[in-house]
Image (cartoon, helix red, strand yellow):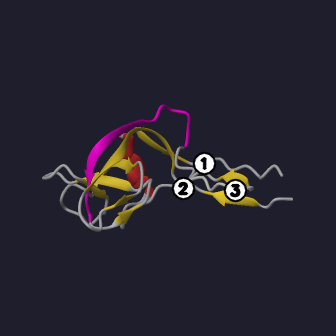
Amino acid sequence: MVAPTYYGDAPFQPGMTTDVFVPDQLIGGDMKVVTHGTRTITGGAYYKRGTVLGKITASGKYTIALAAAGDGSQTPVSLLVDDADTTAGDVNGGIYAMGEFNENAVILGAGITLAAAKAALEAQNIYLKSSLVSADPS
């Protein structure tokens, strides 16, 4: 028996193995997912896919939504489509403009509660839903 090799969203590794794809579970429903590409992501940190973003009013750039921010980014407006490394400066990245997402898979900034994120994102047609869990059938 060949032992399975588990991959998340990593590229395929050739060889004689059994592959098991483990999705990140961010998408949380069958509502159409709409994205906007080429948005400027800033903040000097490494952000993971699903990070709740706010928009800086003065610059129009997106960064992690933090409750203590006073530049407009304290209000959640979107989710990050893919990981973004802004440690060396601003990067272009995609954001979700519409869809249903798993509330247990989003990444919240300091001081942002799930209830606050849900309320703010719903105004943007982004809905955070509780995931359904089922037992492994094996």
In this view, the residue farthest toward the left is 58
- What residue type is disc 1 on? Ser
Question: Is residue 31 located in the magenta-colored stretch of the structure?
Answer: yes
Q: Which mark is first along the chain, 2 or 3?
A: 3
Question: Is residue 1 located in the magenta-colored stretch of the structure?
Answer: no
User: Residue 109 bears which disc, if any?
Assistant: none
Callout 2 crowding tier (Cα within 10 Å): few <14, some 14–19, many ≥20: some
For mark 1, give the secondary structure. Answer: loop
Which quarter of the image is occupied by the N terminus? bottom right
Report, in whole angstroms, how far the alpha carbon at label 3 lies from the one at label 1: 34 Å
For the record, the magenta segment spans 28-43
Q: What residue is at 35 percent from the left and 45 percent from the top? A: 95
Q: Find disc 1 in the rendering and name its residue.
A: 131
Q: Find disc 3 in the rendering and name its residue.
A: 15
Is residue 100 something that shows in the picture?
Answer: yes
In this view, the residue farthest toward the top is 32
